[in-house]
Structures are given as C-alpha cells and as structure tokens.
Image (cartoon, rainbow, N blue to C red):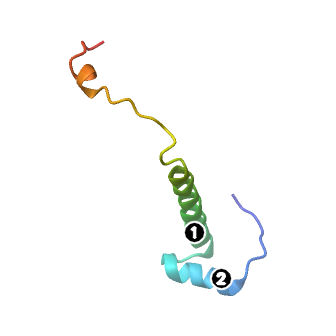
Amino acid sequence: MRTTLDVDEKLVSEVVSITGEKTNGRAVSKALAAYVRHQRIQELRGMLGTTDLIDNWEELRHAEPR
C-alpha cells in the first residue's frame, strides 16, 4: 500500500540501519511488523494466569479416537 507520511528523517535512517533493509519502505514495514508482534505478545502476557486449564491428559490418553 502506498501512503504519504511525515516521519522524522533521523528516525527513518535509524530504522533502516537497525533493520538492515535497503529501502525506507521495507524498513518501516519491518519496524511496524515488529511493533505489532510486540504488542500482541504484551497482550498474551497480560492474560497470563487468567485461564484455568483442566488437567485431563490421562483421560484423553485413554479415550477412543473419533
């Protein structure tokens, strides 16, 4: 997707340098993907301990396949 943004040149240069990408677009896309991944991981960490798992492994082990 093509779009126009006002972004700090120093920041873009740093992102290009850190990512090792050759183009600004690819570097920014990689940085955005990393940010989204980080946020999703944070959400999962926030859910830690909020789900009760039923330990019925033995029961499932001896169950007949469907």
User: Which residue is painted at 22% across and 22% down in the image?
Assistant: 61
Where residue 19 appears, x then y in whole percent?
Answer: 50, 75
Q: Quadrant of residue 15?
A: bottom right
User: Which residue is painted at 78% across and 75% down in the image?
Assistant: 6
The residue that disc 2 covers is: 11
User: In terms of secondary structure, where does tag 2 sit?
Assistant: helix
Alpha carbon distance from label 1 to label 2? 11 Å
| Discs 1, 2 touching: Cβ within 8 Å | no
The residue that disc 1 covers is: 31
Is 44 rendered above or below residue 7?
Answer: above
User: In terms of secondary structure, where does tag 1 sit?
Assistant: helix
Q: Which mark is residue 14?
A: none
Of 31 and 66, the residue lying toward us: 66
Q: Amino acid at mark 1?
A: Ala
The total number of labels drawn is 2
Furthest residue in direction left, as rendered: 62
User: Which residue is painted at 26% across and 20% down in the image?
Assistant: 59
Query: Left or right of 27: which side holds 66?
Result: left
For label 1, count other residues whose C-alpha is less than 10 Å away and answer few (under 14), some (14-19) or many (20+): some
Of 61 and 11, the residue lying toward us: 61
Query: Left or right of 64: which side holds 22?
Result: right
For label 2, count other residues whose C-alpha is less than 10 Å away and answer few (under 14), some (14-19) or many (20+): few
User: Which residue is painted at 58% across and 58% down in the image?
Assistant: 39
Is 13 rendered above or below residue 50?
Answer: below
Where residue 36 appears, x then y in whole percent?
Answer: 59, 58
Is 26 rendered above or below residue 39?
Answer: below
Q: Earlier in the sequence, mark 1 or mark 2?
A: 2
Q: Amino acid at mark 2?
A: Leu
Looking at the rendered image, the quarter that the C terminus falls into is top left
Query: Left or right of 61: which side holds 49?
Result: right
